[in-house]
Image: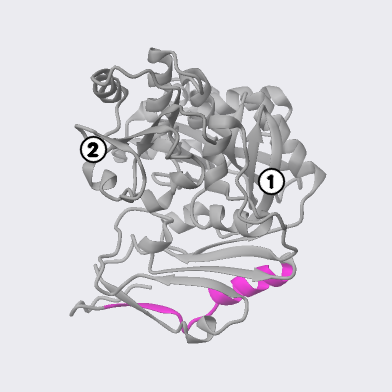
Amino acid sequence: MSDNYNILIILHTEYERSNFDEGIEHKSNNIYYFGENKYLQTIPKRLKHNKIFSPSKEILEKHIINEIGKLNITFDFIIANSELTLMPAAKVRQELNISGSKPDQVEKVTNKVVMKNFIKKSGINIPKYLSLEYALKNKVYAEKLFKRDKIVLKPINGSGSEGVYFYENFGFLYQEISKLNINIIDYEVEEYIPGEIYHLDALVCDKSVIEYIPSKYINTCADFANGEPLGSFQIAKKKQYLELLKKTINALDIEIGAVHLEIIKSTKDDEYYFLEVANRTGGAEIRTLFSEKTGINFSASECSLQINKTIIYNSRKKRNSYFGFFQIPGHHLNFEYCKIVGLEKWLKHPNLLKMTCLDERKKISKTITYRPDKLPVSMTLKASSPSTLEKLIKDIFQDKEIQILPTMNETNYVK
């Protein structure tokens, strides 16, 4: 990890969310961080680094190019590990001829219409889909394609099921679309597939899967966006999961880094269908639990693979236990401060790894987030088998004693 490279890291959140020094040697490399001042100030002073202040809250490639142009430095790598920074980083690489993913590659893993255009050629099942703009201009064709199917309206770019809407059929959407305050060109229409959703999280190098962990959601990210709890638990590996990962990676030309693939097992035909993929780590507690299971530092390895194709281990020993998480959102609540009651028995539970509760003095985030430190409650748990872990998390879901109550003289109550 010590090759004396010039490395630009785009920092779009607090440093502790990524801990780049675990995967990138700071002493021997020339590290430059680009981002807002409030995020740059969170970088530990012990690390040798340089700061480049962004003139805007929005990370734009023109700002990056302009600022680093003042340095007279040729960068070897640009590291970006959030959905919002992948494309700006790719455009800078292309403009300055820096190695790594370019815009056409990043579009395949961020644009849901483009990615499905490539996926359908691979033989993987996909829901019927159209860009919203095309569907509205070609109403007869769209109605013929979707028939009377329930459909989903979702942003073409973005994550976390923010801005997702469900309709009984395309006709209902067509009637209601004018009521939505959205930009038509930014959305797609997709067939709703009933079933259970899984996520496959992997590390990839030279298009080969180094390690992966399959997991199954309890509830969905769309449920979470609507104010319901979300859970996930690791399950046993299957040849079919690995094949789906490999086909996706090859179809989208994913060369290196982390992969978060979401699939659904349809209750209609018992087949797996592609939902979406990201060339980055998943959110919530996925990174932590991947590391617990495999011994691999997921976040650090995502970075180190891009620099010198190495894996960073916390431990060389894989664990036989299975790991999962449970989270309660707060963005939907109509009060700003909260306290959580009814957690006593879970705090003492032998299968609990960690529980994070929002400080009563901190405001509840009003935007959808999976960050444990921003949620009313986030738990990580372990068990000896997937079935035991699933039952444990479902028991937490059904525990009526867990309540979110307003504090600071706020009297409204919403659970």
Task: Give the answer, above or below, for where 273 lies relative to 325.
Answer: above
| Residue position for label 1 | 212
Q: How is the image coloured?
A: one colour
Q: Position of residue 132 (x, y in %)?
A: 44, 28
* Crowd band around label 2 with a 10 angstrom C-alpha radius: few (<14), some (14–19), many (20+): few
Of all residues, the one furthest to the front in this rendering is 28
Region in magenta: 387-406
Q: Which residue does the image show at 26% across and 34% down from the upper left? A: 58
**Residue depicted at 64% across the width and 69% down the height:** 382
Q: Nearer the viewer, residue 25 or 85?
A: 25
Which residue is at the front of the view, 293 or 244? 293
- Can the viewer see residue 143 in this picture? no
Lateral position of residue 173 relative to residue 190, left or right: left
Secondary structure state at the residue bearing disc 1: strand
> Circle 2 sits on which residue?
57
| Residue 395 percent across, percent down from the top left | 60, 77
Q: Quadrant of residue 374?
A: bottom left
Q: Earlier in the sequence, mark 2 or mark 1?
A: 2
Task: Decide which of 248, 281 is in the foreground and name it.
Answer: 281
| Amino acid, disc 1 | Tyr
Cα separation, mark 2 vs mark 1, equals 34 Å
- Residue 398 image offset from top left, x and y in percent: 55, 77
Please report contact status of discs 2 and 1: CB closer than 8 Å, yes or no. Answer: no
**Could you tell me which quadrant the C terminus lies in?**
bottom left
The residue at the point 52 percent across, 58 percent down is 285
Q: For the residue labelled by badge 2, is the local secondary structure a helix, a strand or a loop?
A: loop
Residue found at x 63% / y 42%: 311
Q: Nearer the viewer, residue 212 or 65?
A: 65
Quarter where residue 369 is shown:
bottom left
